[in-house]
Amino acid sequence: MFGTALSQLRYGMAVLTNRRIRPQDIERIAHDLIATLAEFGEPGADSALLPGQAGSVDPAVRRTVTERSLRATAVTAARHTAHYRRTFDVLGLDPATLTPETWDRVPVTPKEALRALPAAFVSAASTPALMALTTGTSGTPTAVWFSRDEVEISVAMSTVSAVLGMGLRPRHTLAYAGCSRATLPLLNVEESVTRIGASFVQIGTVDPAVALDRLAAPLGLPGKAPQITHLTVSASYLAALVEEAERNGWHASDFGLESIGVGGEVLSDPLRERAAAALGARITTAYMMTESIPSGGTPCTEGHLHHTTEFGHLEILDPVTHEPTPPGSVGVIVQTPYVPYRDCTLLLRYATGDLVARPDAEPTCELAHLPATSPVLGRWSGPRSVAVPTRSVLNLLESEPDVPLPARYALADGPGAGRAGADSMGANRAGADGPHADRPGNTVLHVLVRRLPAAALLGRLEERATAAGLALDAIVLHDDPATLPPTGPVRADLREHTFESARPAAARVASPA
């Protein structure tokens, strides 16, 4: 215990002074947490004080730490990266003089700059060890370099989070059904799960029928639950699993799932409910992205997304002007991950592109001491992405059984609203020359459905879209993917090949109790 206390002290001092964090200190903290589990069965009462657990901090202390962290991060970036050295030189700005009040003097870093030249953001004082790529579903994959220390710190923090946040215990088995090319998340999950003493299964984004077979299969492992108990998955691949389960006779009782962690994409409320019913598990979600790890967000019981202040600095800015977003308005998340948590790829005021709304009033929930936003609404791609956000569209579509999952849709200008062979909000009652057919610039929602005609489905969608205040002029239904405008990729499209084939429904046997 003395060794752990010393590790916690060293970790705390490193954070307060912005010095290098020793990975072994956080590893020791995680190891002691696992040992506490083995001896007592549950974490100690002081576990809320561990790294990343969103403990409450005195506002004056937080303000001091924020100023020191911003200044240290800016100084390090200006001194050791080509991009920020040039930025500060051009501006004639001394990073050592910055405060939270003057932080807006630093230009916002667009995602395109990192994508175009990732090496310009890598610190010359670091030792790059691992390149992590994003999936590229929202554009060209973004490359982020990590040092060995960063990887080890990330794994140790993931271990703490898996114990306290996911409730993972040695009897559990977790399956990872994310893209196998997502190097850092896959490494983090596998290492943290096995360090706890739980078991790990790599599934990947294979045929959903094969994935369900694996989730339902008996494990027969000593000391373990009879079946896989936890699943990590993207929202669109979860939708594909739900589609397969609902259409092909799977029942919640076929599985032993206790918890499904969803990330990487917007999870709609209807999909959460359908997944819980189809797979029989509690559905959880959190916010994390490769570029800003370990900074992230945790949902509260009142539906806010609360963002950690321990690992980085959060701003919500207008996506065009980069001015602060007022309460009740929508902006993009802008992150500055702090040194010493990050020492390889350094980012100042990084515009993630993720849209959120600021609450109208200060929250009163259990995480009210942390900055709060709405859940992520979608990705910024222009004014239309705010007027008709991804979350609202998915909430509209994914509650309808006649819309295949994951929902395939496109937002387009109005001239396509009255095409022959489709039902449409403006044209289905007035023919192809309906009142909305020729108005340029109208926003039309094109949706893939199982079959046409679908007058009842269209009526429900129109009514619910109006009630939700969606800025749509028309809804067009298609029963052929070839007639849809480009819909854009989702993570479920990163399908991985396998030699396995799923058992037919008649061949499946009852799962163990």
Image (tube, grey):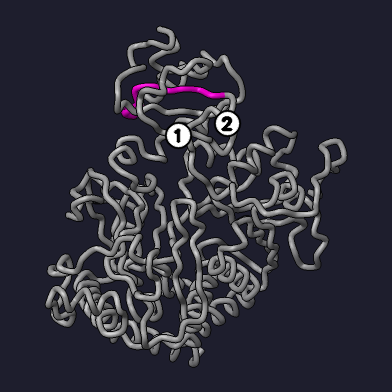
Real-space Cα distance between discs 1 and 2? 11 Å
* One can see residue 351 in this view: yes
Q: Is residue 246 above or below residue 374?
A: above
Residue 192 on the magenta segment: no
Q: Nearer the viewer, residue 308 or 330?
A: 330
Q: Is residue 153 left or right of residue 117?
A: right
Q: Is residue 435 above or below residue 224?
A: above
Residue under numbered circle 1? 410
Q: Residue at x 52, y 77 (%)?
A: 130
Mark linked to residue 160: none
Q: Which residue lies most toward the top here?
A: 430
Residue under numbered circle 2? 481
Q: Residue at x 35, y 86 (%)?
A: 14
Which x, y percent locates residue 371?
A: 28, 58
Mark 1, other Cα within 10 Å: few <14 / some 14–19 / many ≥20? some
Part of the protein shown in magenta:
468-478
Q: Is residue 86 above or below residue 251?
A: below
Q: Residue at x 73, y 42 (%)?
A: 253
Q: Which residue lies most toward the right here?
A: 507
Element carrying mark 1: strand
* One can see residue 341 in this view: no
Mark 2, other Cα within 10 Å: few <14 / some 14–19 / many ≥20? some
Which x, y percent locates residue 73?
A: 28, 78
